[in-house]
Every structure is written in structure tokens, then in C-alpha cells.
Image: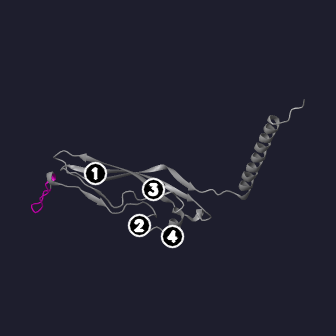
Amino acid sequence: LTHRVNHNLNSAMTNLTHRVNHLSFGEMGKNPSRQVKRALKQVPESLQQFTPLDDKMFLTTKFHQAYHHYIKVVSTHLNIGSTSASMPILYQFLEQSQVVSYDEVNVPEARFSYDLSPMSVVVGKNGRKWYDYLTSLSAIIGGTFTTLGLIDAVLFKVFKPKKL
């Protein structure tokens, strides 16, 4: 409660419903660079957790409740294509939110706690060389030749004319 005469804050009436318009770390932001957008097209969308809280509403239904948001921030290195050395380090984060109930004497507060992970994610794309295709093609042709040779030998033994 405040101690000024002009202000009257009743902690019992505090409603901490809130909306997160945007939350990101590093260069991802609302408008990532063209280079970052191009690189992210090659990463599956299910693996992109750069702004999981954007445009989410957190509604408290009772008094003396507030959301606590726990955020784990993980650095992400994109090693895709020839420009991987100049790519900025991006930060993904995992978020868990839960409603916390407060005593009547305490004023509820929306809390954002974050932790920087000592581990990082490295996203890379390895293309196949031309000789990998040549080796695979040779293996297919050789396997087909061997299989047909075995079938021919079995059929020759089975249907071989018998001498009297």
C-alpha cells in the first residue's frame, strides 16, 4: 500500500493480466535482416523458437495471482552456405509460464526471469558431393547385377534338362 494521501493502491484489487507484444534476444527482433531470413528458410519451422511469447495474452482470473515467466536463452549459430562466417549469433529461448498465487498482504507482480544457457545450438547443412552420387549409383547397378545373376543360376539349376 502507498503512504501518500493522493494515491490509493488496494493490493486486493490488483489484476496482472498482460500481453507480450514482442520479446526477443539479440539481432532477431521483429524485423530480422535479409541474410538471417534467407538462412532461416532452410531451418525447419518447428525448430525456430526465436519469439515464442510474441502476441500472447496472459489472463489472470482471480485476484492475488500473477504470471511468472521462466525463460532459458540458448545461442544459435547458423552454419548454412558460404556466408556462415558472417552470420550473426541468434538467440532462441524456451519459455514456461505459470500462475502464482500471493498472500493478501503482498502485491502480486508479473515476473520475467531468464537464464543464459552455457550450451549452444549449431544448425548446419551438409550437401552431398558428386562422388557420393556416383558411389550410390555404382552400388545400385552392382547389386542389381549380382541379384539377377543369382536368380539366373537358380533358374538354370531348377529347369536344367535331365540327361538319361
Q: Residue 30 carries which label?
A: 2
Element under label 2? loop
Sequence-wise first label, 2 or 3: 2
Percent position of residue 143, x then y:
75, 46
The residue under label 3 is: 92
Furthest-left residue in view? 5
Q: Residue 67 carries which label?
A: 1
Res 82 quadrant in image: bottom right
The residue to which callout 4 is attached is 34
Earlier in the chain: of badge 1 and badge 3, it is 1
Q: In which quarter of the image is the C terminus?
A: top right
List x then y, in percent, for residue 129: 70, 57
Q: Which of marks 1 and 2 is nearer the N terminus?
A: 2
Find the distance from the CA under tag 1 to the CA under tag 2: 24 Å
| Residue contact at pointers 1 and 3, CB within 8 angstroms | no
Whole-percent x and y of residue 54? 36, 60
Identify which amino acid the numbered label 3 is placed on: Gln
